[in-house]
Image (tube, grey):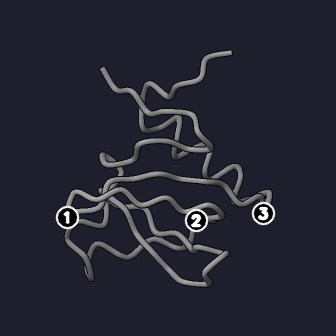
Amino acid sequence: MDNTYSNYQQIVGEMQRLTEANEPFTIKHIKIDGSIRIVNKALLRKQTPKSKDSKAQYKLNYIDTQQDVCGACYIPLLCSLNNKKVIIQ
């Protein structure tokens, strides 16, 4: 079994599948300021329309179910999903 994602469609598809099954997942991503954020129990939430956020197509919106807060991350800044790394070549 491969322990990396080689494209963003794989990781986004897996997050969608887990969210539909109501199974929280762990994501690790780089924030705009360069720091690392780890969300231990996330589920995807409805995306922001492009009319309200010009960069919406590059982002994922999620709910941190442990902290009960909403968050967002840029898809290209995703590092891992459930400790499975994202390596795009």
Q: Nearer the viewer, residue 36 or 32?
A: 36
Percent coordinates x, y for residue 12 in the rendering: 52, 46
Please tell me in which quadrant of the rendered image residue 24 appears: bottom right
Q: Nearer the N terminus, badge 3 or badge 2?
A: 3
Marker disc for residue 33: 1
Q: Is residue 11 above or below residue 66?
A: above
Task: Label 3, secondary structure: give it.
Answer: loop
How far apart in space, not on screen, are marks 3 and 2 (Cα)?
10 Å
Q: Quadrant of the C terminus?
A: top left
What is the three-letter code of the residue carrying label 3?
Asn
Q: Nearer the viewer, residue 33 or 8?
A: 33
Percent coordinates x, y for residue 83 in the rendering: 58, 39
Please tell me in which quadrant of the rendered image residue 54 appears: bottom left
Query: Does the residue at mark 3 contact the one at mark 2 (Cβ under 8 Å)?
Result: no
Task: Label 1, secondary structure: give it.
Answer: loop
Which residue is tagged 2?
A: 44
Nearest to viewer (mark 2 / mark 1): 1
Which residue is tagged 3?
A: 22
Q: Nearer the N terminus, badge 3 or badge 1?
A: 3
